[in-house]
Image: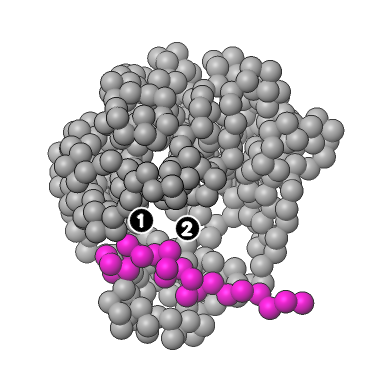
Amino acid sequence: MPLTSLYVHVPFCARKCHYCAFYSEPARAGLLRRYVAALCRDMEAAANRLRPHTVYFGGGTPSLLSLSQWRSILDTMSRLHWLGAVEWTLECNPATVSPEKARLWRDYGVNRVSLGVQSLEDALLKRLGRVHSRRMVFQTFETLRAAGFDNLGLDLMFAIPGQTLEMWRATLHEALALAPEHLSAYELTFEEDTPLYHQLRAGQFSVSEDLACAMYDALLEDAAARGLAQYEISNFARHTRDRDARAPAPADPGTVPAFACRHNLNYWRGGPFLGLGPSAATHLDGVRTTNWPDTTLYCERIEQGQPPAQTRDELPPLSRAGEIAAFGLRMTAGWRFDEFERATGFDLRREWPRELGQLVDCGWGRLDAERFRLTREGLRFADTVAQLFLRVPAPP
C-alpha cells in the first residue's frame, strides 16, 4: 500500500539562528539549483511509493526558494499526480514571502502555512539571530491572507534570554489578535554547539524554571481565551472558523481540533511516512532510514542513482511500541487502549503497568477504563515521562 504522508526537507537558510541545531546551510545559488534538480529526481524515484494525503515542506526555510525553483518542484509533483493533498503545509519565514510566491503555492494546492515568528520584540529577534523584524511579520501575514490562505499558523518561542513575562504576554496578545487558525509555542531549549548554548555556559545569562512555567501557564490561558484549543504540549488549534469563539472544553478528551496539523498527528500516532531531502527520515514497517545531512552529498548520490540514506534502524516491536507510546502521550488526548493496540500490537496496560501507576500516583497521569493521558502538569514534563516508556533493545 502506498505511503500517504510526505515530508520534504529544504535545508537552506538566509542565516543560521542562534538556537538552531537542525541541519541547514547558507543559501548559495549554485547549490540551490542543484538541490532542486536532485529533489525532483528523488521525487520521481519515489513516484510509486506515495499517494499523498498530507504533505509538509519544512526546513530550513522553504520560502527562500525562488519562483522558478518552486515551479520546477510543483510541476514535478503535478506530473507524478502528487497534488491535491488534504493538507499541504509550507513553513515560511517573514520577509521571504512575496505575493507572487503565495499565489503560486495556492494555485498548486498548498493550503496551510506555518509562519516562523518566534517573537514580536525586535530586540529578542536579534538575540535569537532571526533576520526579520516585527513589522515584517504583520506584512507577511497580510500577504498570505490576501492570497487566499485560510489556514495559517504562527510559531512562537518563550523563555528567551531577556524576555520578561510582560513581554511574552504582549507577544501573545498581538499574535492572537491576528486570529491564526493554529499556534505552536515552544520553550527555548539550549542545544549543544549553538551560540546561545555557549553564551549560557559562559554565564552571559541565566534561566529560570519558575519564569518558564509562568509563561507556559500564560500561553494556556491566553490561547484558550482566543479560541485555540490545546491538543499537544506546544500546539493549539481552532475547532471552527469562528475566530471570536473561546475554545470549548471538549466533552470527549480525544477530540482533536479541526485545524490541528494532520501531518504531525500521523507522527505522534506512529504512522508511516516518506522523507525526501538531506537529513530527512522515512519510517515504514518498523524500519527508519535517515538521509545524509549534507546537501552536496545528497545531490551527488541522487545524481549517481544511489539511495541517499545514511542510516537504517530497525527497532524490535516492543521498543518501537514504547517509542510510539511516548510520542502519543505528548497529545492531550493521550492513548485510547484500543487505538494503541491497533497501532502497535501491544496492550499499554499490560506492558507498562508500573509506569502508568507511578504517573497516576505523582499526579502526572490520568487513567480510566478506556484511556491513559497526562495531566496538565504531566504534559509540562513529557520529556521525562517519555523515558519511562522507552525500551532499550538487548545487545545481540
Give the residue at x 31% y 73%.
364
Compared with 351, 204 (above or below) is above
Give the residue at x 54% y 66%.
323
Which residue is at the far right? 304
Q: x, y (%) of residue 299? A: 74, 31
Give the residue at x 23% y 51%.
215
Tag 1–tag 2 contact (CB < 8 Å): yes
Q: Which residue is mark 2?
A: 268
| 379 or 335: nearer the viewer | 379
- Residue 47 on the magenta span: no
Whether residue 242 is visible here, answered yes or no, is no
Badge 1 or badge 2: first in the primary sequence: 1
Q: Which residue is mark 1?
A: 232
Q: x, y (%) of residue 234? A: 35, 51
Point out which mark residue 202 bears.
none
| 330 or 24: nearer the viewer | 24
**Magenta segment:** 375-396
Amino acid type of the residue tagged 1 in the rendering: Glu
Task: Tell me how the rendering is colored.
Answer: one colour
| 189 or 263: nearer the viewer | 189
Alpha carbons under labels 1 and 2: distance apart: 9 Å
Amino acid type of the residue tagged 2 in the rendering: Trp
Label 2, secondary structure: give it.
helix
- Few, some or many residues within 10 Å of mark 1 (<14, 14–19, 20+): many
Q: x, y (%) of residue 118? A: 35, 37
Give the residue at x 51% y 24%.
14
From the viewer's perspective, tell me whether residue 159 is left or right of residue 244.
Answer: right
| 246 or 162: nearer the viewer | 162
